[in-house]
Image (cartoon, rainbow, N blue to C red):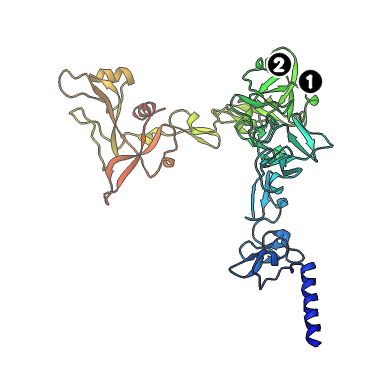
């Protein structure tokens, strides 16, 4: 009887197991043999025989982050933990803990996070086999031209990869991506305007900003008449933009100004961003009409002026006070000059390349290198006799026509000069001179350098003793 009862109890117990199997246990870190034994968002590491987390979704409470290396939920991890910690135009790849560029419209994706705010990673309702792509959410139930709101997201008529929908350039003035204030746009530092990060239109086509569809690209304004079927469009960055008619700067968006068109009408166009956008002698005026910077005569800094002028009192001037020639760099000064404190200062040639203690050239009409006094010959011009040199340079002490032999026609007017030693070009700051190897060596057989005039005008100045 007892045996019969035990057998009946066992049968009932087995029946109960078959009719209602127990639910898989929650994550048991120490033992598992299959994923079924682990909780949601965990998997079984068959080598460690324990459940490990697969994403932050597996973790909660005081340990909200999944350590991808240990598979344990932890309180903190290195790298990013959410997209809010990444720069504009980026999202946090929590698997890698690294900020990555946001995936653009109609580009393949795996997670909603990589599509950025107000976009999702979805398959097209009619083309599920095509995969998942980033698509924007319907804004107030409406979508951009060429897209249809379906299930809360905007989809193109065809599957992504075979769609005519696109994201146009905003062409907003910028100096960096933050100025664009749109993750779909980046700042083109050459144009200084915001352009779409993703180019989906093929060769010969561009994204039309009105329809947000790929249309034929334009090269000049006149092309837009055929492309748009109407006048009043401007070709910018190979796309036709409807002109924003205006009468004054305040009619335009921030960063734009009201300019006259060739046909006499006025429309809004991008203003200057920095002074270098304007012609020399003009600066970028950002104060007269706030929010509408335009080029205006005058300056706010030296860079607004030509290199042989400086900004003084809001104007570019070529001389200032006791300075006869203003400068920003030495290259605009006369030969032998040096730009010091924005003023060209002439060098003293008797010091820089005086003939003393050099003696006249040898009787054989040849100026020789004299390393003991750092005297070196300067070849000034071709000659066949000394009279050729005198006619060109006047009577210069020690000048010879180095043209040995009778009937010589390819000699050089030479004069010996004393040159200062140097180590680098900055030791010879005056225009027309460089620190060059002289051909002489010091007591340690190391090459000696001297400030040598390398421009013909500087050589002549050394020989004649004045600029």
62 over 108 or under it: above or below: below
User: Measuring 69% from the left and 13% from the top, which residue is drawn there?
Assistant: 262
131 over 215 or under it: above or below: below
Quadrant of res 372: top left
Q: Is residue 181 left or right of residue 140?
A: left
Residue 21 is at least partly visible in this image:
no
Q: Position of residue 98 (x, y in %)?
A: 63, 53
- Which disc is residue 246 wearing? 1
Q: Position of residue 165 (x, y in %)?
A: 70, 31
Dot 1 alpha-carbon crowd within 10 angstroms: few under 14, some 14 to 19, many 20 or more? some
User: Measuring 62% from the left and 27% from the top, which residue is drawn there?
Assistant: 316
User: Measuring 65% from the left and 42% from the top, which residue is drawn there?
Assistant: 108
Labelled pair 2, 1 in contact (Cβ < 8 Å) = no
Task: Looking at the picture, tell me which residue is in the foreground, 297 or 338.
Answer: 297
Residue at which label 2 appears: 261
Quadrant of res 322: top right
- Farthest bottom residue in view: 2
Per the image, label 2 sits on a secondary structure element best described as: loop
- Farthest top residue in view: 263
- Farthest right residue in view: 140
Q: Is residue 227 left or right of residue 10?
A: left
Q: Position of residue 95 (x, y in %)?
A: 64, 56
Cα distance between the residues tagged 2 and 1: 11 Å
Position of the N terminus by quadrant? bottom right
Per the image, label 1 sits on a secondary structure element best described as: loop
Q: Is tag 2's residue or tag 1's residue first in the polypeptide sequence?
A: 1
Q: Position of residue 280 (x, y in %)?
A: 60, 26
Dot 2 alpha-carbon crowd within 10 angstroms: few under 14, some 14 to 19, many 20 or more? few
Residue 259 is at least partly visible in this image:
yes
């Amino acid at each position: 009887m007892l045996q019969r009862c035990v057998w009946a109890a066992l049968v009932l117990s087995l029946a109960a197991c078959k009719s209602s199997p127990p639910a898989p246990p929650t994550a048991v870190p120490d033992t598992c043999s299959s994923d079924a034994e682990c909780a949601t968002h965990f998997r079984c590491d068959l080598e460690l025989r324990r459940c490990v987390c697969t994403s932050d979704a597996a973790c909660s409470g005081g340990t909200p982050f999944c350590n991808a290396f240990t598979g344990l939920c932890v309180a903190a991890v290195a790298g990013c933990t959410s997209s809010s910690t990444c720069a504009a135009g980026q999202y946090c790849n929590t698997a890698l803990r690294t900020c990555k560029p946001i995936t653009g419209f109609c580009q393949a994706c795996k997670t909603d996070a990589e599509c950025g705010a107000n976009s999702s990673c979805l398959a097209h309702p009619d083309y599920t086999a095509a995969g998942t792509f980033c698509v924007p959410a319907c804004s107030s139930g409406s979508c951009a031209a060429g897209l249809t709101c379906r299930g809360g997201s905007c989809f193109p008529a065809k599957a992504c990869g075979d769609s005519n929908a696109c994201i146009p350039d905003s062409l907003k003035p910028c100096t960096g991506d933050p100025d664009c204030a749109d993750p779909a746009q980046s700042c083109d530092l050459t144009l200084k305007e915001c352009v779409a990060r993703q180019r989906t239109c093929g060769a010969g086509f561009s994204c039309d900003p009105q329809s947000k569809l790929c249309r034929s690209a334009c090269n000049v304004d006149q092309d837009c008449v055929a492309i748009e079927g109407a006048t009043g469009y401007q070709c910018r960055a190979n796309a036709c933009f409807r002109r924003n008619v205006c009468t004054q700067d305040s009619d335009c968006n921030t960063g734009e100004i009201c300019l006259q068109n060739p046909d006499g009408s006025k429309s809004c166009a991008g203003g200057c961003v920095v002074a270098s956008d304007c012609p020399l002698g003009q600066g970028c005026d950002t104060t007269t009409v706030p929010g509408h910077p335009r080029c205006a005569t005058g300056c706010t800094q030296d860079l607004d002026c030509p290199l042989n002028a400086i900004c003084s009192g809001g104007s570019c001037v070529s001389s200032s006070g006791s300075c006869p020639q203003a400068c920003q760099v030495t290259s605009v000064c006369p030969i032998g000059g040096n730009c010091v404190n924005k003023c060209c200062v002439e060098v003293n040639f008797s010091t820089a390349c005086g003939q003393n203690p050099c003696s006249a050239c040898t009787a054989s009409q040849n100026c020789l290198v004299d390393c003991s006094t750092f005297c070196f010959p300067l070849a000034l011009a071709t000659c066949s006799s000394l009279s050729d040199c005198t006619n060109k340079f006047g009577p210069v002490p020690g000048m010879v026509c180095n043209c040995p032999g009778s009937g010589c026609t390819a000699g050089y007017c030479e004069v010996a000069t004393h040159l200062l030693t140097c180590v680098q070009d900055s030791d010879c700051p005056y225009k027309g001179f460089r620190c060059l190897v002289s051909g002489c060596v010091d007591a340690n057989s190391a090459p000696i350098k001297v400030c040598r005039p390398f421009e013909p005008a500087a050589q002549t100045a050394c020989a004649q003793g004045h600029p």
